[in-house]
Image (cartoon, helix red, strand yellow):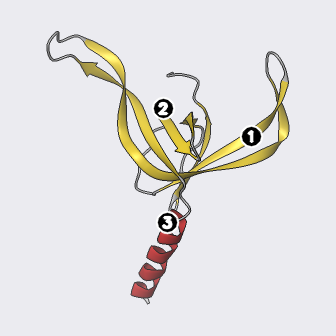
Amino acid sequence: MVKALEGARKAARRAQEATYEGLCTIYEYHEVIDEKTKLSSEEEIPVTENQPCKLSFEKLNRVVQTETAAVQAQGVKLFLAPEIAISSNSKIVVTQNGVTNEYSASSIPAIYSTHQEITLESFRGWA
């Protein structure tokens, strides 16, 4: 019974990953010390590169007022492998269907045995 469940989970994960159409690179902002000068600086460091993923888009039934106009809000969700760690202050660069966009995580990941789902928002800079 346990082996059958394990096999079913593996098959479900393969099916989920077969839908991945994009690649993402995850960056974190860390203090880096220059070995030569011994001075430290903050830098964007890739922690995961070219990770298969999928973006899903949904039109939300609300309008967001910006400084210049009202715009229709869009929900963006990232699907990727469950073992990939994404901290709340990460920048996630996703390329899918020939389009590259920068995002940040706006929710705690929902982690399942087959994948994880993270709601994203447009990256607006490092906090």
1 and 3 marks in contact (CB < 8 Å): no
Numbered mark located on residue 74 in the image: 1
Tell me the crowding category of disc 3: few under 14, some 14 to 19, or many 20 or more residues within 10 angstroms, Cα based.
Answer: some
Q: Amino acid at mark 3?
A: Thr
Tell me the crowding category of disc 2: few under 14, some 14 to 19, or many 20 or more residues within 10 angstroms, Cα based.
Answer: some
Residue underneath mark 3: 114
Q: Where is 99 relative to 18, above or below?
A: above
Question: What is the quadrant of residue 66 in the picture?
Answer: top right
Numbered mark located on residue 19 in the image: none
Residue 18 in the figure: left or right of residue 77: left
Which residue corresponds to the image point at 78% horizontal and 45% vertical from the top-left? Answer: 59
Mark toward the viewer: 2 or 3: 3
Whole-number angstrom distance, CA of label 2 to CA of label 1:
21 Å
Residue 4: give x, y in percent of width and height: 44, 87
Question: What is the quadrant of residue 19 in the picture?
Answer: bottom right
Numbered mark located on residue 89 in the image: 2
Q: Secondary structure at mark 2?
A: loop
Question: What is the quadrant of residue 30 in the picture?
Answer: top left
Q: Where is 27 relative to 43, above or below?
A: below
Residue 18: give x, y in percent of width and height: 52, 65
User: How many numbered circles does the render carry?
Assistant: 3
2 and 3 marks in contact (CB < 8 Å): no
Disc nearer the start of the sequence (2/3): 2
Mark toward the viewer: 1 or 3: 1
Q: Amino acid at mark 2?
A: Asn
